[in-house]
Amino acid sequence: MGLGAGGARGALCCVIGPFEVRCGGVPVALPLGAQRVLALLAFAERPLLRRYVGELLWPETTGDRAAGNLRSALWRLRQPGVELIQCAGPQLGLAAGIEVDLHRVRGQINRVLDHGTELEEADKDVQPLTADILTGWYDDWVLLERERHLQRRLHALEALSQRLIAIGRLPAAVDAAHAAVVGEPLRETAHVALVRAYLAEGNRWAAMRQYQAYRDLLRESLGIEPSDALSALVAGLVPGPAPARH
């Protein structure tokens, strides 16, 4: 399947949040089988063997049936004036020029985690790091990719909070750490990041309140206490009166 006259220029495949494909800004309706092929290739960022794709996406069928399902999905991926999939012998890949939102976020994550790389302004945006991939999909391969992406973006949110503190962007640092807490409420490093961000703001009450809330959650859920490292951050803090409500 070669590229159509227009190639895939202007095509966007979204796998963060709900699945969506847009060509020239216009949504493209695709059946589920075609969506799954496109999403798998978007995750891989490299060509995959046709046989591997068929067997992964249709594991409950025979090899011949999986190959037939794949052929049907590829046929349905043909759109007027654009080809989304490129075939080269036994391999399948995304057509050249198609953009994938996940690739942009992976780039942001890599830059945030590399403390030797200066952040671009767009890298300081917390929002792209807050969403799961393919919401509502529960295939085994999707669940694995979702967990992998979750762990990477949580690491990035914690690191981003620290880097934003260093440049004085304190409200954004709190937002990044808070997003990490929401993403995994029992993750201690996320709570450490949020307590540090509150303390950087001078928000001792909020830091102590966050520590106490996490301590209570740990006791109720796991029967354990926060680590000494987290407790040391709030050692000596005395919670003041709750702020007045207006």
Image (cartoon, rainbow, N blue to C red):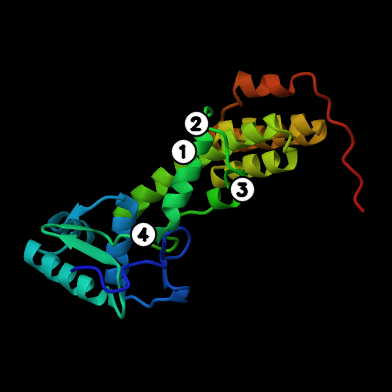
Gap between marks 1 and 2, in whole Å? 6 Å
Q: Amino acid at mark 2?
A: Asp
What is the C-alpha distance between the residues marked 4 and 2? 32 Å
- Sequence order check: which comes first, mark 3 or mark 2? 2
Task: Work out whether 75 lies above or below 165.
Answer: below
Q: Earlier in the sequence, mark 4 or mark 3?
A: 3
> For the residues marked 3 and 2, what is the alpha-carbon distance in whole angstroms?
16 Å
Quarter in which the N terminus is drawn: bottom left
Q: Residue at x 43, y 46 (%)?
A: 149
In the picture of the structure, the residue carrying the numbered disc 4 is 138
Residue beneath disc 1: 110
Amino acid type, residue under disc 4 in the picture: Tyr
The secondary element bearing badge 3 is classed as loop
- Tell me if label 1 and label 2 are in contact, CB under 8 Å: yes
Report, in whole angstroms, how far the alpha carbon at label 4 lies from the one at label 3: 28 Å
* Between discs 1 and 3, the one toward the N terminus: 1
Query: Is the Cβ of the residue at disc 4 closer than 8 Å to that at disc 2?
Result: no
Q: Secondary structure at mark 4?
A: loop
Q: Which mark is residue 114?
A: 2
In the rendered structure, the answer to whether residue 197 lies left or right of residue 42 reads right
Which residue is tagged 3? 125
Q: In the image, residue 7 lies at what x, y percent?
A: 31, 68
- Which corner quadrant of the image does residue 192 belong to? top right
Residue 157, quarter of picture:
top right
- Secondary element under disc 2, as helix, strand or loop, is loop
Note whether 235 is above or below 160 in the view shown: above
